[in-house]
Image (cartoon, rainbow, N blue to C red):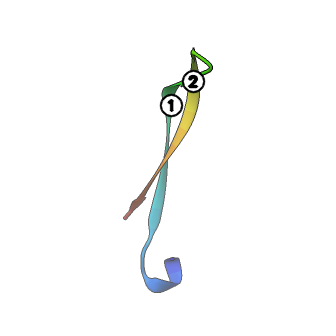
Amino acid sequence: VAPSGVDLVCIPAFTDVMIDDEERTAIKLIIEPR
């Protein structure tokens, strides 16, 4: 999307998710226009 003039930024963050009734840590990638 950069050639169309839209710059994107990626913000990594940690979050907790439930998998098979176990709380696990996951990485969440937040994509936003700049």
State the residue position of label 1. Answer: 14
Q: Quadrant of residue 6?
A: bottom left
Q: Give x and y (percent) for residue 8.
A: 46, 65
User: In this rendering, is residue 25 above or below 1?
Assistant: above
Marks 1 and 2, the one that precedes in the sequence: 1
Q: Residue at x 51, y 77 (%)?
A: 1
Q: Does residue 24 appear left or right of residue 16 in this picture?
A: right
Identify the mark at residue 25; answer none if there is no mark: 2
Element type where label 2 sits in the image: strand
* Quadrant holding the C terminus: bottom left
Q: Give x and y (percent) for residue 32.
A: 40, 58
Q: Residues within 10 Å of mark 2 (few under 14, many from 20)?
A: few
Q: Are marks 1 and 2 in contact (CB under 8 Å)?
A: yes
Name which residue type carries label 1. Answer: Phe
Q: Give x and y (percent) for residue 18.
A: 54, 22
- 23, 14: nearer the viewer: 23
User: In this rendering, is residue 16 above or below 28?
Assistant: above
